[in-house]
Amino acid sequence: MTRYILINLLKRKQKQKRITLLIELFLSFLAFFFIFSLIVREINNTKYPLGFNYDKLYSFNPFYIGKSEDMDANHIAQKELISSIQLYPGVEAISNYNGSPFFSKGYLNPSQPVNGNGISIPAKQINLMHVQDGFGKALDLKFIEGRWFTPQDNASNIQPVVLTQNLKEMMFGNSSVIGNTIELQGEKCKIVGVCNVIKHKGDYSYPEPTLFVRIAHGDNVQYKMPRGGNGSIVTSAFLLKSQIETSAEFESELYQYLKTNHPDFQVLITPMNETRNKYIRSTILPLVITLLIITALFFNVLFGMFGVLWYNISQRKSEIGLRMAVGASKTAIYRQFITEMLLLTTIAIVPGIVIAIQFPILNILNMEPIVYVVAIISAAILIYSLVVLCALMPSSRATKIQPAIALHEE
Amino acid sequence: MITLKNLEKVYQTDEIETVALNNINLAINKGEFVSVMGPSGCGKSTLLNMMGLLDIPTNGIVEIDEVEINGWKDKKLARFRNHKLGFIFQSFHLINDLPVLDNVELPLLYRNGVSGKERKRRAQEALGKVGLSARTKHYPGQLSGGQKQRVAIARAIVGQPDIILADEPTGNLDSKMGMEIMEILENLNKEENTTVIMVTHDEKLAKRTNRIIHLFDGMQVN
């Protein structure tokens, strides 16, 4: 019967009507696929742990507001400021870091691919972070093998790096990597540790393979703090970890202390949980808007398709009467219309699926393949359900009338 | 073969009640060729619909082969129509979107155990009987009125029914075409012993049948 219906669908004249319906189904599938990809990506990302604890973290941004133009004097003042904070009661760790900010969509990639073990990872797939020794402690990173940076690394003449577990697996698989080297922007770097993955861009972000590069300590360190009040942006930020959970009291005391002891600096201290809350709000809002769009789209497609199917089936009442006269039961009629619609939907969404499959193959939206698979399946289920829902009522009504009456409806 | 006892059909709307058939008692034997005549609106087509199980009587009994049909469920009625009855309509009722062969095989589609190949073979055979073997791939829109009615006859006979119910089968045709259709029906009746019940306005055609049933205002008058 299904074969008969398919052949008849293809043989039937009035192809224009069916083509219009096919285009509507095809476009709806692609729209649903795209929206589902975005939603599934956000949901899929929540399965990965954040990888660090933000309860005791602050982002700390100092701006130089002193009058001195003497770079050396500035340099000394900056180092004094950091040393002073390190000794401040309640501060557990402070680290300069140069990379994309926490709980933000910004990014910093290497300028060239990272090579190692005969594998080259494209630069855009790697999150690069230049950090100091206090960074690992501030984030409380867990080590799968090796260690975090220590002052002893100053003695090494080769740049030490730490990889997150996912980056290590991409380059080296499951083998041990401590002591191996990788090439970063033409420079050889030695792997000293492999730590857990982190989602520093936020809870709904993908845990990007991250490469930590050590900022050396000692006299050569340049913090590159921007001048305040001239519209400059923060190019170098600090991460500060307190011994207790973040509090307004700790913040205001630290402000007061710095104002008194380091008047040449203006500082911006932001608790990380506050940044995270802002991030969640800014992520949830587009998600809610997306859900509203999908709801509107759903009803638009629902009503559009319902109208088309109602019209199509009403136009075929005489045919329904005839089919009943020659021996079709109401169930058979019902089944025929539903099958016809399901077949039409299949014809419409097959090219849609072919297009959707290109997304993971060509890595168009830079998402995990599973996201696309779930999005394709969800979009297909939704379209099929919509079609069945829309075909049920008109075909049910059409079969309720007596064949003698249906036969008179032209 | 077909027995109608005290058959009544009333169409009820909010405002008016129309009695389409009133106290019809009728018996049609196997192999008979019966015509039903009467003025427009007298209930001829309604009577045919009752005998064809296409509509439900308000009162009375319909028996086919001594089996009372009243109260049968849709599925049983559908199977019964499929095996026992063949319909021919004045306006042909062909599916214009489908080619002739697909139109003809339609009743077999709803019959269990008939393969696609077998359906095609039998549809070809039925079209052969009405002289339209060469038109299988044509669409109804490409045929003349007489050819369309012959396709409808092929569709009616493809399932080898015992009874053919023809509702003014020549009503939309000129007299020459009408005669051709009548001859096909007569042949079916004589050669295959098919019972034929035909509604007609044409007295000449009616006279060629075994018996004429006259209706007037929903009642049998002879």
Image (tube, rainbow, N blue to C red):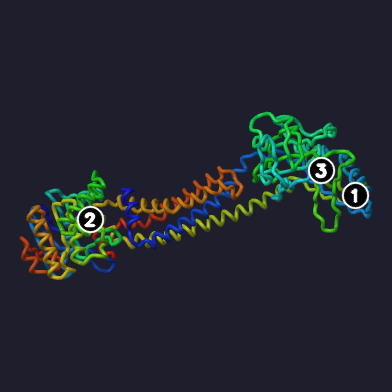
Residue B59 in sight from this viewpoint: no
Residue A367: give x, y in percent of width and height: 60, 46
**Residue type, label 1:** Lys
Report in which chain the residue with disc 3 lies: A
Q: Which label was assigned to residue B33? A: none
Residue A58: give x, y in percent of width and height: 78, 44
Q: CA distance from mark 1 to mark 3?
A: 20 Å
Q: Which residue is mark 1?
A: A259
Left or right: B62 as drawn, with respect to A346: left
Q: Quadrant of the C terminus of chain A?
A: bottom left
User: Does label 3 lie on the same chain as label 1?
Assistant: yes
Q: Nearer the viewer, residue A271 or A70?
A: A70
Q: Nearer the viewer, residue A327 or A25?
A: A25
Left or right: A99 as drawn, with respect to B28: right
**Residue type, label 3:** Asn
Q: Nearer the viewer, residue B31 or A213?
A: A213
Q: CA distance from mark 1 to mark 2?
A: 96 Å
**Residue type, label 2:** Val
Q: Which residue is mark 2?
A: B104
Closer to the observer: label 1 or label 3?
3
Residue A365: give x, y in percent of width and height: 60, 50
- Specify the quadrant of the image occupied by residue B19: bottom left
Left or right: B2 as drawn, with respect to B11: left
Residue occupying the point 21% across, 67% down:
B144
Report in which chain the residue with disc 2 lies: B
Closer to the observer: label 1 or label 2?
2
Q: Which residue is mark 3?
A: A96
Report in which chain the residue with disc 1 lies: A
Q: Is residue A138 above or below residue A32?
A: above
Left or right: A6 as drawn, with respect to B106: right
Do labels 1 and 2 touch, CB within 8 Å?
no
